[in-house]
Image: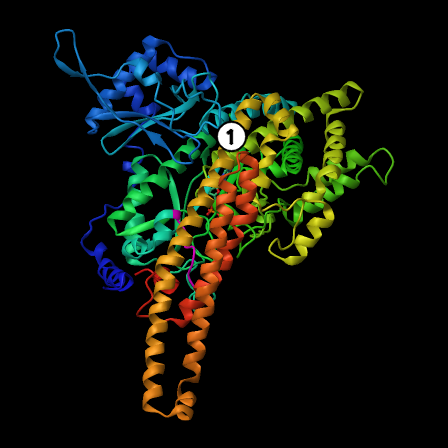
Amino acid sequence: MENIRFTALQKFLEHSHIYEDKKVPVIDSSVFGSNVFDLNTMSKYVAPEAYNNLKEAIETGKKISRKDADHIATGMRIWAKERGASHYTHWFQPLTGTTAEKHDTFLDFDKSGSAIEKLDGSALVQQEPDASSFPSGGIRNTFEARGYTAWDISSPTFIVGDTLCIPTIFVSYTGEALDYKTPLLKSKEALNNNAVKVVRLFDKSINKVFPTLGWEQEYFLVDEALFFARPDLVLTGRTLMGHASSKDQQLNDHYFGSIPERVLMFMRELEYEAYKLGIPLKTRHNEVAPGQFELAPIFEEVNLAVDHNQLIMIIMKEIAKKYRLRVLLHEKPFKGINGSGKHNNWSLMTDTGINLLKPAKTTKGKLMFLSFLVNIIKAVHDNADLLRASILTPENSHRLGAHEAPPAIISIFVGNYLSKILNKLEDCGKNTQNDGFEQYMKLEVSNIPEILLDNTDRNRTSPFAFTGNRFEFRAVGSSSNCASPMIILNTALAAQLDKFYHDVEKAMSEGKKLQEAVISILQDYISKSKNILFEGNNYSEEWVKEATKRGLSNISDVPESLKSFIDKTTIELFDKTNVLTPKELTARYNILLENFVLKTQIEARVLGDLAMNHIIPTAVKYQNILMDNVHTMSKIFGEDEYKKHVGNRIEIIKEISTHVNQIKTLVYSMIEERKKANSEQDLQKKATMYSKNVLPYFDKIRKHVDKLELIIDDELWPLPKYRELLFLR
Ligand code: ADP
Ligand code: MG
């Protein structure tokens, strides 16, 4: 039988020319948003009254009437039809991590029974999909399978292919959130409510505050033929075995290098499609690892940015196929080289156009900046475990702490300049008598430059870094829904700002002036949370030790980390801010645990199958060849003579036996552990058993497989090797 690896390599060479006959249009701003029913387009298709009511509803959060919804739906349908759409769908983000859609045509019948096209307000605003196959974490009773999807008017509808997509939230029949969007919108609201109170202490012209998000999406591309020759990539999204390539990223010659032509054409088509969908892509480049790339848009309001990231992850996979490429969004597709993250650049913006993480001109504005900076530090400090839980997926757990990825210790980098400012803040008023605060205002605060971008050094190793006018949460994984960490950041900050506002009010009621009140409270926050500030190398061993000394947690075990979702403090936080109920939190916790169990189970099966069905037979085949050779040699040469010739071949034969025996023993033991875990009824215990007793076998088995890869005849090896997967043409 032919070796599938060689057949795949042959196809790979053919694929490398595929771009030559593709014609990809060049992007320009005129196509931007052409497939989006944004407010501008809507104004041309919807009567002014309904349009104005919707606009007001978006701004105030009020509901729109059924009549207005009908008008808007009709305009939307006409527009969609003009652009070739025949179907529509509610587009939502269930807790599976991907997006969901169920397409319906516009077909309907009028009173006379003639076929017509129709989309009415009720179909636009609300639907009841069968929710029984989406994860609900125990919220939904099996007899009540219905769920509701409801139109999110703040994110515009768009067309993909022949389908009009309507972004919606997804809740259970009893009203509990079963998605990412619902709590994200609520967290925005909570943040707005509390942030507005705080900003108005400094600037009465502000009426609204909203979070902004700019994500940087890293990903790998592999050739489609090679991808299909790796069952582990197909089934789990990552390689469960494979020896390191002699050369991979050591020379850093891929980073910012010239982009291979085939990849460039893929990127161009992706950008073109993204533009049509109003996704403002800005940057594209090679990443550090060979085969790894990144794209990033201009930042947007958080809800829209999350939708756009979900959308881009879908369309990039589709477009890649046209180039016989596969996108790997897994956080750690290859061992020993960089994994993929999705840096979440996060900041806060006001309706007056102020970025709250950029110091304003006035001293008051600068104090406002400092207030937000310190409150964020405090919020992250107090919720570090929860923040980690929001990004520590099974996939990301392989990335964090490995090869050039931040460790599972949450720390904050603010840069040299701000560090000094914060140090002085902590000390002010302590050495001098009464004028400490005032002096600090005069000397430190009013001298903060308006542009910190030039004054902030970069630390690429920090999981959470201030980068001049925003925070960059770098620990987020490449396949995550950004909403997961955004919900936590928004909510934690909302609660923190509420506390800050009350602390300031209290201090002022005791006779302190605003500035003095603010400074003294920030001073207190800094001394309570400064142990999370770290300016050094987060990748170093010393930091792990230092963090332990400081009492910072370092949890890379997924089930252990997820427990934060049901912590007393978490439950209080979400209750107080009205973002998630205790029931919803418990459901999320269960869903994430279950997800961990299932993914680990699938990987364990794939690993076992590959080891037993691909690797051991190949090893035995090669061993037989060697043994034939030894046998023949013994016939040609005499008893004493032949051993001199074949001694090292016998060593190889023995070595192969050792690895084969080890693999078999380990796979069988792993299966035993899996069985034990599977019979455990308690989900939390089961997940822990998978983590502690099953997962550790992965590396042990892999070690022997990877050793065999080095020994066995290359012509027999069945799986594409790292050196073949990583270097695209
Ligand atoms: P780097 O690689 O240096 O981190 P990039 O230019 O690749 O920088 O990405 C920076 C991201 O941060 C972009 O998506 C950018 O739009 C985003 N960004 C810039 N300002 C803000 C802001 N105020 N809020 C949120 N994101 C921002
Ligand atoms: Mg970045």
| Residue that mark 1 sits on | 588
Residue 282 lies in quadrant: top left
Q: Could one spot residue 476 in this view of the protein?
A: no
Q: Could one spot residue 367 in this view of the protein?
A: yes
The amino acid pointed to by label 1 is: Arg
Question: Which residue is located at x 73 percent, y 49 percent?
Answer: 549
For the C terminus, the image quarter is bottom left
Instruction: In the rendered view, tell whether residue 503 sits above or below residue 393.
Output: above
Closest to the observer, 161 or 258: 161
Residue 110 lies in quadrant: top left
Colour scheme of the picture: rainbow
Label 1 environment density (alpha carbons within 10 Å; few <14, some 14–19, many ≥20): many
Residue 310 lies in quadrant: top left
Relative side of 213 to 565, left or right: left
In percent of width and height, residue 167 lies at 37, 26
Instruction: In the rendered view, tell whether residue 279 sits above or below residue 657.
Output: above
Chain part drawn in magenta: 236-243
Dominant secondary-structure state across the stretch colored magenta: loop
For the N terminus, the image quarter is bottom left
In percent of width and height, residue 352 lies at 52, 26
Relative side of 705 to 43, left or right: right
Closest to the observer, 378 or 97: 97
Let me know if residue 440 is in the magenta part.
no
What element does badge 1 sit on?
helix
- Is the CB of the residue bearing disc 1 within 8 angstroms of ligand 1? no
In percent of width and height, residue 416 lies at 66, 50
In percent of width and height, residue 254 lies at 41, 61
The residue most toward the top is 111
Question: Which residue is located at x 13 percent, y 10 percent?
Answer: 113
